[in-house]
Image: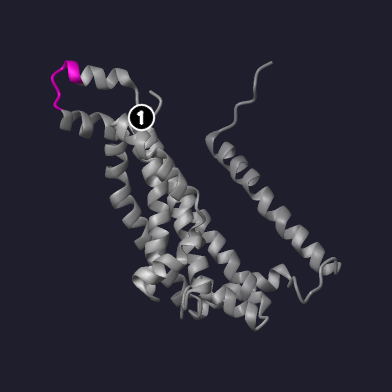
Amino acid sequence: MKSTQYPPFVNNSMRVGRSLIGPVALIAVWWIANDSAWVSNKLLPNPFATFGSLWDSLVSGSMTKDLAATLYRTLYAFGLAALFGIPAGIALGSNDRIYRSIESLVDFFRSTPATAMFPLFLLIFGIGDFAKIAVAGFSAWLVVLFNVAYGVMNSRKTRILAARVMGASKWRVFRDVLFFESLPQTFVGLRMAVSLALVVIIVAEMFIGSMDGMGHRIIDAQQVFDLQQMYASILMTGGVGYGFNLLFIALEKWVVHWAGR
C-alpha cells in the first residue's frame, strides 16, 4: 500500500497543526475548569484574561525590565558554564584515568540540588547578582562538563586512530577530532545547561533579595494575590525556557548536521 505524498508546504502545515494540539487542549481545559468553577476563580483566573494581562504587561513595558534582568543573569551564568565547561570536558574525557578518578565527585555535585548550594554561595559572594549567577553557572557547568566528557569518551575510535596514523599531533587530534566528535553530545549538555541555569536563576530571584527579575515578579504577584500577573509571569518564563530549547535544537541541526554520517 503506497503512502500518500504531500507537497512540502502541506507537510509543514500539518506538522505545525499537530504541534498546536497540546497548547490548544491545555487552554481549553483551563477555560472549562475556570468557567465551570471546578477550581475557584480566586485560584485560577480566566485564561484569556491572563493572556490579556501578559500582553498588556509586555506592551506597557512593566514586564520588560524583569524579563531583561532574568535573561541577562541566565545568559551570563550559561556563558560561564560553556566557556569553562567545554574545554574542561574535552580534557577530562580524553583521559580515561582522570575521568574515572573524579567521576563520582562530579556526579555528587551534579546530583546535589542547586538550592542547597545557595547558603554557601551567599557566604562566598554575598547578597547580590553574582551570587545568583555563580550558583546557576556552577550547576550548569557540571552538566556541560559531564556531557562533553561523555561525548569525547564515546567518540569513534577509528577517526582518532586514523588521525594518529597520519601523524597528527596530540593537539591536532584534540582540536580537529575530539572536539568535533563530541559536538552532538556537547549540544545536549548545552541545551540542558541553559534550561537549568534559567530554573536556578528564577528560584534565586524569588528568595535571594532580588529587586527585579521574573522570579521576583512571580513571588511579588503571589504575595499581593494578583493571580493574573502571577500566571502571566509563569507563562512568560515557560516561554523563555521553551524558546531556549528551540534555539539550541536549531543550532544543533545547523552546526552538527553531519552527525551520524
Residue stretch rendered in magenta on the structure: 164-169
Is residue 133 among the parts visible in the rendering?
A: yes
In which quadrant of the rendered image does the N terminus lie?
A: top right
Seen from the viewer's position, the closer of residues 181 and 34 is: 181
What residue type is disc 1 on? Met
Residue 88: % across, % down: 29, 44
Which element is circle 1 on?
A: helix
Residue at position x 60%, y 26% from top? 5
Residue 71: % across, % down: 42, 65
Residue at position x 66%, y 72% from top? 50
Quadrant housing residue 73: bottom left
Is residue 71 among the parts visible in the rendering?
A: no
Q: Magenta part mainly helix, strand or loop?
A: loop
Quadrant housing residue 172: top left
Q: Residue furthest bottom?
A: 224
- In the rendered image, which residue does mark 1 sit on? 153
